[in-house]
Image (tube, helix red, strand yellow):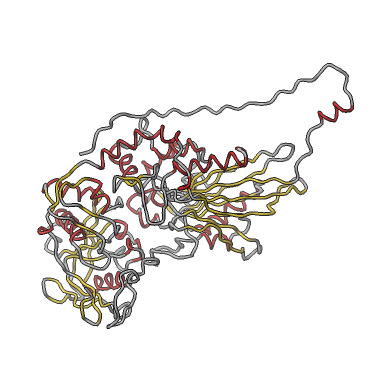
Amino acid sequence: MPVPPLNRRQFVKKSAVTGAAVAAAGAMATTPARAAARKPAKAPKTWSFSILGTTDLHSHVFDWDYYTDAAYSDTKGNSVGVARVATLVKQQREAKGEGRVLLVDAGDIIQGTSLAYYFARVDPIGDKVQHPMAVAMNHMRYDAAALGNHEFNYGIDTLRKFESQCRFPLLGANALDAKTLKPAFRPYTVKRIFVPGAPDIKVGILGLTNPGIALWDKDNVSGRMVFPGLVEQAKKYVPRLRALGCDVVFLTDHSGLDGSSSYGDELPYVENASNLVAEQVPGIDAILVGHTHVEVPSYTVTNKETGEDVLLSEPYCWGYRLTVFDFELELHHGRWQVTGKKAQTLNPSTVEEDPEITGLLRADHELVVKYVNTPVGTCTEDLSGAEACWKDVPIMDFIHQVQMDSVKAGLSTSDAALPMVSVAAPFSRTADIPAGSVTIRDIAGLYIYDNTLYGKKLTGAQLRDYLEYAAKYYHQVPGGTKVDTATLTNANSFWDYMYDTAAGVSYDIDIARPEGSRIQNLTHDGKPVADDQVFVVAVNNYRANGGSGYPHIAAADIAYSSTNEIRQLMIDYVTAKGSLNPADFATTNWKLTQDGTPVF
């Protein structure tokens, strides 16, 4: 059951105070020296300013891991959370001047941690409940943020509530109303950098989000919003910003920079298109990149039409890094022109958390800590996900069992007799459900996404294609060659979350064979799976709608769908049984082989 709030922080908007200097004229006679002293300073011919950038914060406020109930730690010494980033932002403003620094985000703000889930589902944001990320980012004085695809995970209504709490615009030039095809969010904002004695520098900030939203959150956006490509919309709005007199055009894209897509041919638009935008759309000075959770301190793309260089930077994710774009400008005939630009990333692990953000949000953090530590049952033995990427382990069978039970219970009479299969990915290699007491955070650490559940119909031939697609996760390792798990997977391009294992059928994955011919001995109830045999496949909504580009599944007939999160179904399973016992669900139904010989 949800833990009731301990107390609620009331959010009070701070009033902005502005002032003007008042000069008093003296009564005495003006001397040449005094006249010279009173002459305005000569207008500067050069100026500099910076744009700071974050991305994929995923509701990391503090340097804390809710899944381990401890301070965040990784092998690279990273810290997480905007509270530390806020300290770097303060340092940049102090060093360069308040009026010379803008702060921008590239999306994926309100989903990704137990804190995000708590304020979406347990104690939802509204008139009296403020989202902690809105509080933090307002305090940090963000100037703009792009919409990320995960902004839509909890539905448009939740997103609109978050938007109403932000004192900065959420930008999405390619998030359009499905009926009018007009922008559903602000496409851009224009900021002014004050230069004493000279024209202001006008900075146009254009926000672009990911076309994959149309697939990944189809249930939330279908019929309400559409998401054309980044290049297409940038070609429309960049000239508009130049026509408005913008001296600098800056893009914040929730889209990577390698030109790839993880949804196959389901959409005509590229998922990771920031490099294409830079290359194909003239008039852009720099792009803050997001979505792919990598660190790219500085990257240059030459625009094909103008030959001008476009500067790109991606500051990793979760508050691991802060990008700093530095711009140099010169005044020519009353207009500012960019003469120099550079980018770098800063590491917040070198500074302390901002005590003001700590004071604002400590109570909210403690609410979530209490919630995730709520016991829901017990487990008879330790269940680890450390080897789930190459072995059939019981912790994954727990997910499969819950998915199959839930879909079976919701099938129509006509579909109830069909054989059942479950597919799921090993989201976390550090997942562990301990022997003894099991808490919400133990299960949340295994199933880290807020996915919901589908049942879709696939034939035996389609199921084989599906598993063959999954099997490309492994590098080819010839028979007789030692298998090294450190280099076995294609996890740098075919990520762990993209790799599905299956339950309900038995099969081997022969890693000695080339891609497309690895699935061997595919059987159901001890019999070879026939090409025309029909299965109901339990699958999460991300995959069911085309996520990761799996064949057949997006177009398959729907036998079941639910708005309940799979994570919550897992919590309910343990709560109902009281004890999690692998004897109830664990079975070894798949294995890796080399030329037919088991690897493990």
Q: Is residue 154 left or right of residue 354?
A: left
Q: Position of residue 493 (x, y in %)?
A: 40, 67
Judge whether residue 135 can be spotted in this image: yes
- Image quadrant where one finds the C terminus: bottom left
Q: Is residue 128 left or right of residue 182?
A: left
Give the image quarter of residue 123: top left
Q: Residue at x 64, y 54 (%)?
A: 341
Q: Position of residue 171 (x, y in %)?
A: 50, 46
Judge whether residue 164 can be spotted in this image: no
Q: Residue at x 33, y 39 (%)?
A: 119
Give the image quarter of residue 96: top right
Q: Position of residue 516 (x, y in %)?
A: 31, 77
Q: Nearer the viewer, residue 322 or 459?
A: 322
Q: Is residue 500 left or right of residue 180?
A: left
Q: Nearer the viewer, residue 204 or 346?
A: 346
Q: Residue at x 69, y 49 (%)?
A: 329
Count of numbered badges drawn on the protein = 0
Q: Nearer the viewer, residue 137 or 423?
A: 137
Outermost residue on the top side: it is 27
Give the image quarter of residue 412: bottom left
- Image quadrant where one finds the N terminus: top left
Q: Is residue 405 above or below residue 191?
A: below
Q: Nearer the viewer, residue 47 or 193?
A: 47
Q: Is residue 149 above or below residue 168?
A: below
